[in-house]
Amino acid sequence: MVDRFSDGRWLVASARKSERLSDRILADDGRELGRMELGDGIMHLKIDGSDRIWVGWFDEGVFGNQAWRVPELEWPPSAYGLAAFDSEGKVVRVSSGSAPDDPICDCYALNVVGSDAWACTFPGSPISMSDNGTRFRWWRTSLPVGVTALAVEAPHFLAAGGIGHDSDRVILGCLDQNEGTPVGEWTLPFKVGYPSAAAVVDAREDCLHVVIDGVWHSWRIDQFQT
């Protein structure tokens, strides 16, 4: 997994790992500048507009990483399902859960829009937003289990993928006070959920990206609103 800081440095991390401090910061010429620990079982990694590193873990990361401890947290950062780190690897924010009383068991989709982070998580497939890294807000949804990408141009969102017969679905929705309500649904010409033949299914800001059979497909939310 790769993303870039605003000063041109690269962050390179592996989803699965057995060694501590194995996630690397590289200069733009490839020199290693430092290492950090972001844990095992990473599902998504994004750097936001304020150079915070957002990490979402799948279930083996959430319920694993038992030896990983940081001074300010009772549990490993991954136990919260979603967390933010500064550019040196220090935890600056952890999620409070996928609903008021439910922990995150799996971070299905993660996006950053400016300095805000957006996620769709399990259980319940709610959409969450971290406002500039300081406040979490939640919207209940009826999205299918296993959404793989979430594009956002508030108040609208575009959720792609799911499990089984939902694997080729893309849903346009609108966020109101407490709910994310579907307003349109389409079938893609290929599967982007589980199972999927795509090499990449992801979203950044208001754009959904799919790479399949060597072809890069890209759609913006406003293309589904017209």
Image: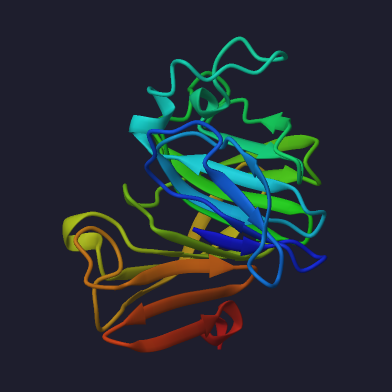
Seen in the picture, residue 102 relative to 196 is either above or below; the reply is: above
Expressed as whole percent of the image width and height from the top left, the position of residue 17 reads: 39, 39
- The residue at the far top in this view is 74
Seen in the picture, residue 153 relative to 79 is either above or below; the reply is: below
Expressed as whole percent of the image width and height from the top left, the position of residue 159 reads: 45, 63
Query: Which one is in front, 210 or 45?
Result: 45
Residue occupying image coordinates x 71% and y 64%: 27
Residue occupying image coordinates x 62% and y 41%: 178
Expressed as whole percent of the image width and height from the top left, the position of residue 193 reads: 28, 62
Residue occupying image coordinates x 40% and y 68%: 201
**Quarter of the figure with the C terminus:** bottom right
Seen in the picture, residue 33 relative to 8 is either above or below; the reply is: above
Please state if 22 lies on the left or on the right of 205 as rendered: left
Query: Which one is in front, 22 or 216?
Result: 22
Coloring basis for residues: rainbow
Please state if 53 lies on the left or on the right of 198 as rendered: right
Asked whether residue 127 is in view, the answer is: no
Expressed as whole percent of the image width and height from the top left, the position of residue 216 reads: 42, 86
Q: Quadrant of residue 191?
A: bottom left
Asked whether residue 159 is in view, the answer is: yes
Seen in the picture, residue 34 relative to 223 is either above or below; the reply is: above
